[in-house]
Amino acid sequence: MTGTAKRPPTTSAGLPLRVEGLGKTFRSARGAAVRALDGIDLTIGAGEFVSILGPSGCGKSTLLAILAGLDTATDGTASVGGRPVTAPLVDAGVMFQRDLLLDWHTCEDNILMQFRMRGLATAPYRDRARELLALVGMEHAAQRYPRELSGGMRQRVAICRALVHEPPLLFLDEPFGALDALTRENLNTELAALTAHSGATVVFVTHGIDEAVFLGDRAVVMSARPGRVIADVAIDLPVPRGPQVRELPQFTAYTARLRKLLAHEVQAVAVEGARS
Ligand SMILES: Nc1ncnc2c1ncn2[C@@H]1O[C@H](COP(=O)(O)OP(=O)(O)OP(=O)(O)O)[C@@H](O)[C@H]1O
Ligand SMILES: [Mg+2]
């Protein structure tokens, strides 16, 4: 154990989220318009865990960035806790597709950056950072630098950084993409337990159909670009979810249904690609 400072209480209740008629058009470097999102309507209750699936390039990361206040919509609105999102949300935990760890800080200091950025002392949270590192099997890495780690190890440190301040809102963009199958399943179980405990609202982007079902209260499927919501499936599986949930026939039925919906959209991307 390190540090004896008392850890201040953190926010735990999740925040609701609402998106209405949301659209986004990018301008490419050559000035062409790229319609990434179109007419997205989504209501996410406080404490809900919503998985988002969709073909590559359909606007999932763009949607997450707009919800987190890191990008702006071209049309429509996004609100969190009843307030329009107009600036980066300071009480959200965000994990990007790329880990964005700072190579000149140790892993522990990367995690504690959440507090430094908010002008808070880091000492009270050092134990929490180490607890999280242990949870993802990275206790040995606290004093190592990200450049010394593999891609999957870096991702695990980035997960700790997204969770350490126990945010009421979590935006996770393919957090387990770089991990081997078993580590990924173990972390799915840990994430289910952590978020159930904290009560955070979670928006979880993934290409993994199994983990979308395992973790989600709902799975939202997006169309090929421009991304629209084409299905919103309530996942009615027992909670808390442990590894045995994957053996249930309903689990297989959900994954089969989502796979079919996705296959149709991925096919649309392939046809579009062949035409252009
Ligand atoms: N800054 C930008 N300028 C121009 N086009 C962009 C920009 N950012 C994203 N796009 C385009 O918008 C579309 C959606 O991109 P986005 O990264 O949101 O997709 P995604 O669903 O997250 O894909 P993946 O599953 O591969 O991560 C893509 O066609 C992408 O090329
Ligand atoms: Mg993405």
Image: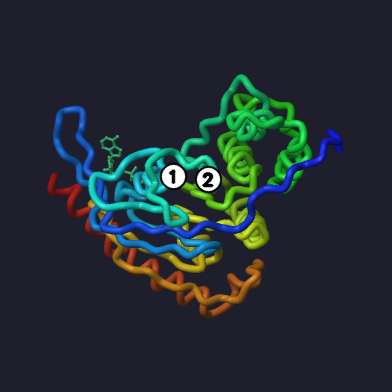
Crowding near pointer 1: few (<14 within 10 Å), some, many (20+)? Answer: many
Q: Quadrant of the C terminus?
A: top left
Q: Is 9 on the left or on the right of 93, as rendered? A: right
Q: Residue at x 30, y 47 (%)?
A: 57
Q: Nearer the viewer, residue 81 or 50?
A: 81
Which residue is farthest bottom?
249
Q: Which numbered disc, 1 or 2, marks the residue that appears first in the sequence?
A: 1
| Ligand 2 is within 8 Å of the C-beta of the residue at disc 2 | no
Q: Residue at x 52, y 57 (%)?
A: 15
Q: Position of residue 112 (x, y in %)?
A: 66, 33
The CA distance from mark 1 to mark 2 is 7 Å
The residue nearer to you, when weighing 184 against 40, is 40
Amino acid at circle 2: Ala
Q: Amino acid at mark 1?
A: Ala
Say which residue label 1 marks: 68
User: Dividing the picture into quarters, in which one does residue 232 lie?
Assistant: bottom left
The answer to whether any part of residue 189 appears in the image is yes
Residue 204: percent from left, percent from top: 48, 54
Number of marks in the rendered image: 2
Mark 2 element type: strand
Q: Position of residue 155 (x, y in %)?
A: 57, 40
Q: Would you say residue 223 is visible in this rendering?
A: no
The residue that disc 2 covers is: 92
| Tag 1–tag 2 contact (CB < 8 Å) | yes
Query: Between residues 255 and 66, which one lies in front from this camera angle?
Result: 66
Vertical relation: 230 (above or below) 173: below
> In the figure, is residue 270 to the left or right of 141?
left
Locate residue 69: give its quadrant: top left
Using residue 174 as the reference point, say whether residue 240 is left or right of it: right
Q: Looking at the picture, does residue 218 appear above or below residue 22?
A: below
Say which residue appears at 53% left-offset and 50% top-offset. 170
